[in-house]
Image (cartoon, rainbow, N blue to C red):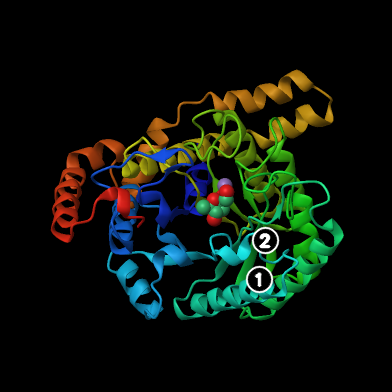
């Protein structure tokens, strides 16, 4: 095995979502966990633990409304992350919870909603400068529920104008990622429904705007690796939100339903690196909701699954693949992919982890650490002392 296969893992830094450590649920309810994070400091402590155990998650994504209190110095939040060896990663504006956004934010026909949304986007950008985060990730719940509800072209133009105002607030080192989603919560049309719409917006904005691919935001059976390949070729792929799905935006653990798909996506990235000599600048972020699994274990499982599939994809024999492709040998071309996918990479992962000073089996190391028991006891006591019932706390 070549060194470059193993060292390719250095290019896979995975960002943990702060919201993945708090109690979350479905629209039908929540099942609470005694060890779930109560506040942002807990979320950083848990993310710090995942980073310590896996050695590859140095940043944490924050959701502005959920992680920054009104009037709080944002530097305090950055310092709380640093305490656990982390840096603030992407800043996620929240343009979907305020009552003002009933008919949308950037796409709304109401100028007051648009101006509040733009103001929030600019504030998030300024906040990013203070906490030294270079990525602002925009996701919009915008859209309409019924045919005729609003003028689709007018909404597009409102989006262009609002995004432009936010883009103009970026510092030269900041970038804006635009996430697309074809459904939910809007169910007739969403304003940025697919990668093409995100691409058009980003292209018009300029080089600091790129497309964000959330793996759960596609119609059934859509070929995501093709989207990835096209965006890579156009230098327009800015980041991922990792998760897996069976039906819609299920936010299940990466690779739990279709690991071969993630392998194929990663193979496109390795193919790009093989051709250009370097890995593209991509933010790899987890965006999952662990309703039932213990949250930290689920996060470790996601990270190790991503590394496993990444390594398998790095094993694709590019020369053999190219040879089979240009000679029209379809069976052999597919076999090259299958061979890499079916390789057991456990020993290689252990070798890489050893070189980074982390345990060969991160999940086992976590279970042995006693951290789960410690936080469960601590958070149960703190909830009791503060009189917080989990039903009333939305950390
Ligand atoms: C929307 C989404 C988006 C949000 C996150 C909580 O479905 O994927 O990225 O920020 O979930
Ligand atoms: Mn997402
Ligand atoms: Mn989503």
At a point 40% along the width and 77% down the height, the residue shown is 74
Residue at left offset 16%, top offset 57%: 382
Q: Is mark 2 within 8 Å of ligand 1?
A: no
Q: Is residue 145 above or below residue 223?
A: below
- Classed neighbour count for the residue bearing mark 1: other residues with Cα under 10 Å, few (<14), some (14–19), many (≥20): many
Q: Which residue is mark 2?
A: 104
Contact check, label 2 and label 1, Cβ < 8 Å: yes
Residue 103 in which image quadrant:
bottom right
Q: Please, is residue 58 above or below residue 333 in the view?
A: below
Secondary structure under the numbered disc 1 in the rendered image = helix
Write down the quadrant of residue 271 in the picture.
top right
Q: Which mark is residue 200?
A: none
* Spatial CA span between label 2 and label 1: 7 Å
Using the image as rendered, state which of residue 225 and residue 381 is in the foreground. Answer: 381
Q: Quadrant of residue 349?
A: top left
Label 2 sits on a secondary structure element that is loop
Query: In the picture provided, is 197 more to the left or to the right than 176?
Result: right
Where residue 157 sits in the image (x, y, percent)? 82, 67
Q: Which mark is residue 113?
A: 1
Taking the image as shown, residue 211 lies to the left or right of residue 364, namely: right
Q: Earlier in the sequence, mark 2 or mark 1?
A: 2
Q: Residue 190 placed where, x, y %?
A: 72, 51
Q: Is residue 194 left or right of residue 352?
A: right
Who's the residue at 31% across and 42% down the image? 32
Q: Residues within 10 Å of mark 2 (few under 14, many from 20)?
A: many
Tell me the quarter of the image containing the C terminus. bottom left
- Is 206 situated above or below 280? below
Give whichever of 394, 80 is nearer the camera: 394
Asked whether residue 372 appears in the rendered view, the answer is yes
């Amino acid at each position: 095995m070549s060194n470059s296969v193993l060292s390719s893992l250095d290019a896979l830094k995975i960002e943990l979502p702060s919201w993945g450590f708090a109690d979350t649920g479905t629209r039908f309810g929540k099942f609470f966990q005694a060890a779930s994070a109560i506040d942002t400091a807990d979320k950083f402590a848990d993310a710090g633990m995942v980073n310590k155990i896996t050695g590859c998650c140095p940043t944490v994504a924050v959701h502005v409304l959920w992680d920054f209190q009104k009037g709080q110095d944002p530097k305090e939040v950055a310092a709380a992350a640093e305490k656990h060896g982390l840096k603030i990663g992407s800043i996620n504006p929240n343009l979907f919870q305020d009552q003002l956004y009933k008919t949308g934010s950037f796409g709304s026909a109401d100028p007051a909603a648009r101006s509040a949304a733009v103001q929030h986007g600019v504030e998030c950008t300024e906040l990013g400068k203070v906490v030294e985060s270079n990525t602002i990730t925009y996701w919009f719940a915008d859209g309409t529920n019924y045919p005729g509800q609003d003028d689709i072209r007018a909404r597009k133009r409102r989006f262009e104008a609002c995004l432009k105002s936010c883009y103009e607030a970026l510092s030269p080192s900041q970038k804006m990622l635009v996430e697309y989603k074809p459904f939910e919560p809007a169910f007739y049309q969403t304003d940025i429904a697919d990668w093409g719409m995100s691409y058009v917006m980003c292209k018009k904005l300029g080089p600091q705007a790129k497309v964000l691919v959330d793996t759960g935001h596609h119609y059934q059976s859509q070929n995501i690796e093709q989207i990835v390949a096209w965006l890579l070729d156009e230098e327009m792929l800015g980041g991922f939100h990792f998760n897996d799905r069976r039906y819609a935006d299920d936010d299940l653990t990466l690779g739990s339903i279709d690991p071969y798909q993630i392998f194929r996506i990663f193979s496109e990235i390795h193919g790009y690196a093989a051709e250009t000599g370097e890995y593209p600048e991509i933010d790899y972020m987890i965006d999952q909701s662990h309703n039932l699994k213990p949250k930290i274990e689920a996060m470790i499982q996601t990270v190790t699954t991503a590394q496993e599939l990444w390594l398998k994809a790095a094993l694709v024999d590019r020369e053999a693949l190219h040879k089979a492709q240009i000679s029209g040998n379809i069976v052999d071309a597919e076999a090259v992919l299958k061979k890499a996918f079916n390789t057991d990479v456990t020993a290689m992962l252990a070798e890489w982890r050893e070189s980074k000073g982390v345990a060969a089996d991160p999940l086992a190391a976590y279970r042995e650490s006693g951290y789960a028991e410690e936080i469960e006891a601590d958070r149960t006591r703190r909830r009791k002392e503060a009189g917080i019932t989990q039903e009333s706390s939305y950390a």
